Image: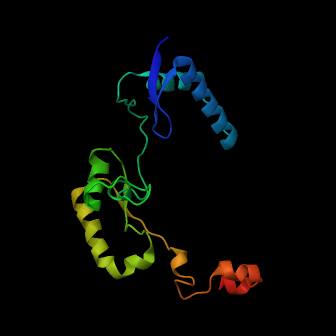
């Protein structure tokens, strides 16, 4: 009985029989259809996926017109950061990470932002952040997005000046929590 080396969704390499691969695809499709309230895959779609998973080659391409747009939020952090499980800790700058995603990983759009990804720490260094974005714009072709968001925890007590809604709501102080 021949086996197929493939990878699971978490990237773990596994060896499965053809029947196991097909059963796993059907189970996954049925689970997704149930959760997403969508139809399951059709036979020709299963056949295409099986051909891809069973291929002995390490690289698989798609036909023209069937490509998917690749983009990533917090993208550069996944290469240069080594915080907990958020990155692989490569000795690269954000600009180098951006170019790697564009040129090596074939991404179609990218986002670059401050490591903290929060508005408050970026405000004092916005001019420096502009230089990072400009460097990427000068060296890359794909669209560049700058990502950030308010980290509300930095604005509420004990770290910030405003009362914490998590403290006010249990006390029934709804109006104060909304203010």
In the image, 24 versus 95, the foreground residue is 24
Q: Position of residue 57 (x, y in %)?
A: 35, 24
- Look at the picture and state if 63 lies above or below 11: above
**Coloring scheme of the render?**
rainbow
In the image, 137 versus 163, the foreground residue is 163
- Quarter of the image for residue 164 reads bottom right
Q: Which residue reaches farthest front?
A: 84
Residue 40 in view (yes/no): no
- Look at the picture and state if 7 lies above or below 55: below
Counting labels gives 0
Residue 91 in view (yes/no): yes
Residue placed at 33% from the left, 55% from the top?
89
- Look at the picture and state if 14 lies above or below 147: above
Residue placed at 27% from the left, 46% from the top?
103
In the figure, is residue 114 to the left or right of 99? right
- Look at the picture and state if 103 lies above or below 73: above
Q: Where is residue 69 in the image (x, y as percent from the top left)?
A: 42, 45
In the image, 163 versus 140, the foreground residue is 163
Q: Where is residue 51 in the image (x, y as percent from the top left)?
A: 46, 21
In the figure, is residue 134 to the left or right of 78? left
In the figure, is residue 125 to the left or right of 4? left
């Amino acid at each position: 009985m021949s086996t197929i080396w493939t990878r699971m969704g978490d990237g773990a390499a596994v060896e499965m029989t053809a029947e196991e691969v097909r059963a796993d695809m059907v189970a996954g499709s049925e689970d997704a259809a149930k959760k997403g309230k969508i139809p399951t895959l059709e036979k020709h779609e299963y056949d295409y996926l099986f051909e891809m998973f069973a291929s002995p080659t390490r690289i698989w391409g798609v036909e023209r017109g069937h490509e998917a747009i690749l983009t990533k939020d917090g993208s550069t952090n996944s290469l240069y950061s080594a915080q907990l499980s958020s990155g692989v800790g490569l000795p690269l700058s954000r600009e180098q990470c951006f170019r790697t995603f564009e040129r090596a990983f074939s991404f179609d759009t990218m986002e670059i932002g401050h490591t903290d990804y929060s508005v408050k720490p970026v405000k004092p260094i916005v001019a420096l952040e502009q230089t990072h974005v400009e460097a990427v714009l000068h060296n890359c072709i794909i669209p560049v997005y700058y990502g950030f968001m308010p980290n509300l925890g930095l604005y509420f007590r004990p770290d910030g000046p405003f009362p914490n809604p998590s403290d006010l709501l249990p006390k029934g102080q709804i109006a104060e929590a909304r203010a």
